[in-house]
Amino acid sequence: MANYIGKKCISCGELFNQGDDIVVCPECGTPYHRECYLKEGSCINTELHDSGMSWGETAQSGDESIRCIRCGFENASDKIFCEQCGTPLIKGQETESRPFNEPDSESENTEGDGEGTFNPFGASTGGRGQGAAGGFGPIPGQMVFDKNSEVDGIKLEDYARYVRTNPLPFLSSFIRFGKFGRKISLNIPAFLFPHIYFFFRKMMLVGTILLVVNAVFNLPVMIDTLQSGRYMNYTIDLGIDTSSKLFKELYTAGFYLSFALQFVAGFLANYIYYKKAKKDITKLRSDETLTEEQVAERLPMIGGTSMGALIFSFVLYTAVLIGGVFLVYQLK
């Protein structure tokens, strides 16, 4: 019956909730509250009967609702948080319904124990057991959050609107930063593509710094590639002795420094993004002339992602790298 949670009874118009006594039409599969079906005496979904389709087929193809992974509620496609329990929604996520994540009745502690056992939006983060997202009850003493919960004075709903795409991993990290003072959180895309990722998330200043530094570190690699003929099987003689001890040391140092830069970016990217999000949201909220609707519209615009900035980072990196090679050639 969990598959019907959040759907409407065609008879009374009320949404199905967990624990409701639900029956379905044996012919088309339309769900009813048992008392509604008994009151009607038979299925009243005549349009579906005439079409020869089943209720399940129309339910899947007739809307773009997003099923909450925590409570199973069907939300409109434009929603960011579940209207029933406040869990962040992700399009394309699994549709299996999950039990509600209410605080343990034996514990009124909602501040957690500081050991990573808090449960943001029903997802277990380790510690003494598995959270609601794993199909078990909440962890005693865990922290429970919804869209109105605040981290550093900013509601999680604002953070989610600012992040815009794939908000759940970011919100989990933001909670750790704001509630426990942590700064380290692994971001694999930032580790693999440091400056590109920062440009993509509109962190232009940090992205530019990383871009220039990374280009400097990779300058010996570029010079060696051009002179060795590994670039499109075409050799460019820059007149630089790549077999010298100094060049080899610079080449090795650049390689390891570039790798170290990836680690720094990969483990601090989320924290840097958190600080920027907090600053941008606070600035936007300080404008008292804006309505809630205007704030909700502008948050994804000042946050979110930028494919244009990502492409620009490629062009800028190439320009800086080629400019560095030319500068070395002129100074040799």
Image (cartoon, rainbow, N blue to C red):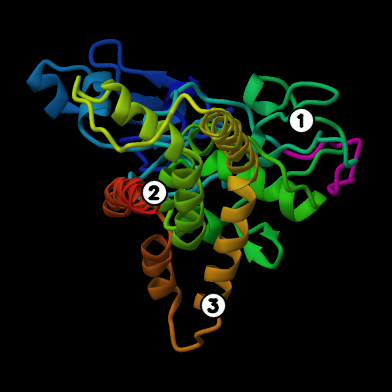
> Which residue is pictured at 81% across the width and 33% down the height?
117
- Identify residue for label 3: 283
Mark 3 / mark 1, whichever is N-terminal = 1
Query: At numbered mark 3, what does the secondary structure look like: helix, strand or loop?
Result: helix
Query: At numbered mark 1, what does the secondary structure look like: helix, strand or loop?
Result: loop
- Identify residue for label 1: 138
Q: Is residue 88 above or below residue 226?
A: below
Q: Residue furthest top?
A: 26
Residue 109 within the segment the image draws in magenta: yes
Depth check, mark 3 against mark 2: the one in front is: 2
Q: What number is the disc on residue 239?
A: none
Q: Amino acid at mark 1?
A: Pro
Give x and y (percent) for residue 270: 60, 47
Disc 3 and disc 1: Cα gap in Å?
36 Å
Q: Is residue 243 above or below residue 261?
A: above
Q: Amino acid at mark 3?
A: Lys
> Which residue is pictured at 36% across the width and 43% down the height?
13
Disc 2 and disc 1: Cα gap in Å?
61 Å
The reply to whether residue 52 is visible in this rendering is yes
Quadrant in the rendering for residue 250: top right
Mark 3 / mark 2, whichever is N-terminal = 3
Q: Main secondary structure of the magenta part?
A: loop
Disc 3 and disc 2: Cα gap in Å?
43 Å
- Identify residue for label 2: 328
The reply to whether residue 41 is visible in this rendering is no
Residue 52 within the segment the image draws in magenta: no
Mark 2 / mark 1, whichever is N-terminal = 1
Please report the bounds of the magenta region as a residue range: 102-112
